[in-house]
Amino acid sequence: MKAQEKRFGAVPAGRRLPGEFFARDGITVARELLGKVLVHETSLGTVRGVITEVESYMGVEDKGSHSYGGRRTARTEPMYHQGGTSYVYLIYGMYQCMNIVTAVENVPQAVLLRSVVPADEESGRRMELLRMKELEEKAGRRKGYSFVRTHLSDGPGRLCIAMEIKKEDNNIDMVESPVFYVTEGLEIAPEWIHAGKRIGIDYAEEAADYLWRFYL
C-alpha cells in the first residue's frame, strides 16, 4: 500500500462527476476516468480510490461485451440504463466486477474498473483491513498480509473486495447516490495513458485484439 500511495500522494476531495460525463461513448469515458476517484461508503467508513486501469466494452457490436448482439437479460439489464449506472456482476462464482455504464439509455456500453490505488492514507488503511477480513473469512486465519499490501486493489476482484463493492451495489445511479459515486481527481496528461488488449476475453475473436484497455 505504501508504494502505491507514493505514486500519487493524498488526493484532495473533488466535485462529483455529473451525468453528462458518463453520457458519452465508452472509450472516451474510459480514458477520462483515469485519475478520477471512486468513492464508496463501506462498513469501515468512506473509501476513496484513484482509478488507474479500465477496459471499455462497447455494446452490441463488441464480441467481448455482455450485451453483444443486443443480449438483454436480468444480468445485463443495467447496461441498458443511463450512463452513470453501476453494473456489478459475479465471475468464477466468487469475485465481483465493478463497471460503470456509459452512453445513453438503451445503448449498452460500460467501463470495467480494473485497478485503483488509495486516494488517501485512511482509505488505504481501510482497504487493507477489508482485504484481510476477506482472507480471514475464506481461510479461517490471517495470512497473506505481504501479498495484500503489494496487490491491494489491482485487478477487478481485489478492487471490489478492497472497496467492499457487493452485488447490492449493482444498478445504482452513481450520479445521485450519496454513498457510491465518482469525483474529480488528478489531472492526467495524455502521454501518461497506455493502451493494450483487454484481459480474459480470448473467446471474443477479433475483438480480443482491440486496444480498449487503458492504464496509467
Image: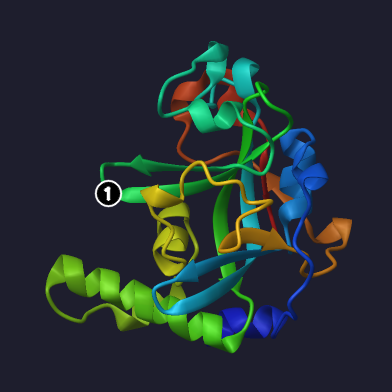
Compared to residue 88, the image places residue 24 above or below, namely above
Q: Quadrant of residue 130?
A: bottom left
Residue 141 in the image: state x and y as whole percent.
14, 79
Compared to residue 1, the image places residue 191 above or below, namely above
> Dot 1: few (<14), some (14–19), or many (≥20) neighbours within 10 Å?
few
Q: Nearest the camera: 70 or 84? A: 84
Inspect this view and state whether residue 149 appears: no
Q: Nearest the camera: 52 or 161? A: 161
Q: Residue at x 65, y 27 (%)?
A: 58
Q: Identify the coloring.
A: rainbow
Compared to residue 175, the image places residue 14 above or below, namely below
* Amino acid type, mark 1: Met
Inspect this view and state whether residue 129 appears: yes
Q: Residue at x 73, y 77 (%)?
A: 13
Residue 11 in the image: state x and y as whole percent.
72, 80
The residue sitting at the left extreme is 140
- On screen, residue 147 versus residue 170, left or right, reads left
Where is the C terminus found, in terms of image quarters? bottom right
The residue sitting at the top extreme is 69
Compared to residue 203, the image places residue 146 above or below, namely below
Q: Quadrant of residue 178?
A: bottom right
Residue 212 in the image: state x and y as whole percent.
67, 38
- On screen, residue 210 versus residue 205, left or right, reads right
Q: Residue at x 71, y 79 (%)?
A: 8
Q: Quadrant of residue 146?
A: bottom left
- On screen, residue 212 versus residue 158, left or right, reads right
Q: Secondary structure at mark 1?
A: loop
What residue is disc 1 on? 94
Q: Residue at x 85, y 67 (%)?
A: 187
